[in-house]
Image: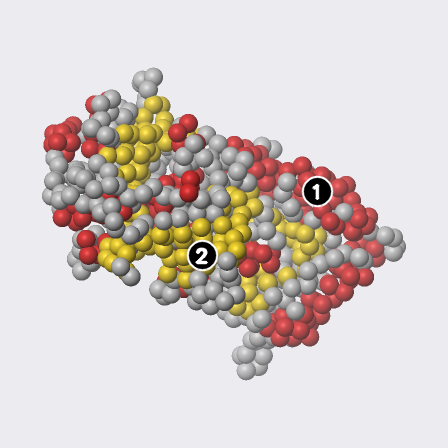
Amino acid sequence: MVRTTRLLAAWAAATLTALALPTVGARADDPAPRVDLRVLLVDDGGPAVEAIAAELATAGTPYTKLDLKDAGRPRIDAAYLSDTVDGRPRARFQGVVLPNDNPFGDGSPEMAALAGYEKRFGVRQVDAYTYARPAVGLNAAQEHGWSGPLDGKTATVTTEGAGGPFGYLKKNVPFENNDPDVNESYGYLSTPLEKQDDGATFTTYVDAPIPGTSSRGSLIGQYSHDGRSELVVTFVANQYQTQFRLVSRGIVEWLTQGVHLGASRNYLGVHVDDLFASDDRWDSKRKCTPGDVDCPGNPSPDAPPIRMTAADATYAKEWSKSHNLPLDFAFNGVGSEEYRSSHDGAADPLLDRFVADQQSFRWLNHTYTHAFLGCVQNTSVVPWKCSTDLLGRIRWVDGQKVTQEIAQNLSWAAARGLKVEPDELVTGEHSGLRTLPQQKDDNPYLAAALTVTGVKWLASDSSREPQQRQAGPALTVSRYPMNVYYNVGTAAEQTDEYNWLYTKKADGGSGICENSAVTTCLKAPLDTKTGFASYIAPLEARIALGHVLSNDPRPHFMHQSNLAEERIGYQVLEKVLADHTALFADNTPLVSLRMSDIGTEMRKRAAWSAAVDAGKVTAYRVGTQVTVTAPAGVEATLTLPTGTTQVKNGTSAPFGAAYAGQRSGWAAPAAGQSAAVFTLPAAGAPAAPHATGTAARVQAPAPTLPVPPGAGHRVPRGAGDGPRR
């Protein structure tokens, strides 16, 4: 048990301290208040508040941040929190996030103003990280519970949590333990007070066993008292940690009472590049890949290039169907023609199988030959560089070549009955787009080629360009490269190359990891027989799951070689799927979008965020009606209770799509309407403001809370958790 005995006296005093406030509340004849759909976030610079801010920002939920360290910040008082609009009282914020239950000074008028405001308008408060003590409805952890690191422990969603804001989770909430040498979490476990103050209740939503006892202690719970409700969180987390990513949706839904701007999904898209082509194979003796610029010489005759077979295609179809996960195949037609040429013109069984089963997959144009479409590469040096003319100007692959690569692959597919969406494109190595450090600009001929061929969505590498941008007529769709390499078909090959990249020279590796500020070295080389299954696949699955839990629609990509021979790519995907199934309820499935839909989602998010940041969005609730106004052409993103309808010119239709126990999606006004209007179901509407009466008490400030090093910043999950090669 971790104890801080010198604070016991302070806690006891805090429990008894109360600040009397004037009576507040709406009169019986007051009109229903207007509640603006915006969150007030009071920031102390700690990771807990920043984590909630990240969740709000990612979902597209507007918030106003007040920095407690900024001496010039606005002061919180009644005038700051509320006013009157069109004769109706207005609450300027629908929820309040505080670093703890009272981050202000003892007897603070700001906390008093917040308490009165919350009671008057029925607004809820999240205590992002606070002590377990009577001031928040819990027994003092130092006397009746436990406090300390939670690394590697597993919390559980209670029955009340499953029936409330955390109904999208199945049960378990595991805490990360990425590095045994770093404390990554800290928390307080304690039971609710057996005797609460008059009218007060504490409902535990997420708990964990209290070490050394048969009791369970709260980690997240609702403390209702004095006409107010607080969500009491007694552990610290940052925005990258699994435990926070799992509960963040529930925190926001509780705070906003299920009515807010913004939406979140668990996305998983998988692109498989180089279909029909053969991928060069890693040479475990030379520690390089023959055919690459840094690997002179020819491939070994007993190590031929890697190419899927018809049996692999059949397996892909069956696997995709049984796991309910579509696969997007990016294809190079020349690979099939090369196969036919090397087999005396015989038909390509791989092509025949995929054409017959093409409805089981999604298809992406990957150019005909996978040629590099950026600058003309000078491969006489390592690393390669862009060739230049006599005047020192960069030589570019010409526009005719770029256009031909795109168009020829589409023509080849059409001639063989393979139906492809022509507006989606993945170039070889994402070439044509800038490729740092060698190529700082896009190929100037790229835009024209994309225009001629009708490309609207162009794949990019998220390790180089994580954000969407314009490339001629197209918008980019960034993809996550997976650390399952293009040049391996077996687990032993993958592990050997992985060892080369992530072990020190003294251990037989390249030593690259010793000279990098963005990754770490393996403590020892992995066993090539077991290392993939025991270390690489689980690590890659955890990295991918982290993206899934972050409301990130960007797809992952691997290569056809990873679905050939030992089919090692499936091991990673199966781990992601199994972990997701174990964590989430059936109402929160994985969402897999095709490339154009991902690009559209990213475009809509960017437009929405820009409108919110510019102050051009107005959204509020009055009773059971929600009204949202945004600039023309900008769709609004919302999450609302099941049963919500959108009112369009006098008629109503169900809003959005069902997800995680609610309805969410994009919406725009109907023709002739200036705002999007929604009607909430009476049963799902937020609670009415508290009646007039004695105002809420204000407890004394909480003592300073410990934040371990690993909660203050992201701790890598392993040696390979860094930028991709």
For the view shown, which residue lies furthest in the front direction? Answer: 29
Q: Secondary structure at mark 1?
A: helix
- Residue drawn at 18 percent across, 45 percent down: 24
- Residue drawn at 47 percent across, 47 percent down: 644
Residue at label 1?
316
- Residue drawn at 71 percent across, 46 percent down: 360
Q: CA distance from mark 2 to mark 1?
A: 45 Å
Where the N terminus falls, by quadrant?
Answer: top left
- Residue drawn at 40 percent across, 48 percent down: 624
Is residue 634 found left or right of 4 in the rendered image? right
Is residue 158 found left or right of 268 in the rendered image? left
Q: Amino acid at mark 1?
A: Ala
x then y, percent, for residue 273:
65, 53
x then y, percent, for residue 659:
51, 43
The answer to whether any part of residue 606 appears in the image is no
Q: Residues within 10 Å of mark 2 (few under 14, many from 20)?
A: many
Residue at label 2?
677
Is residue 146 found left or right of 173 in the rendered image? left
Q: Quadrant of residue 318?
A: top right
x then y, percent, for residue 164:
41, 34
Instruction: Please determine whether, in this image, residue 681 is positioned above or below residue 374.
Output: above
Is residue 240 found left or right of 696 in the rendered image? right
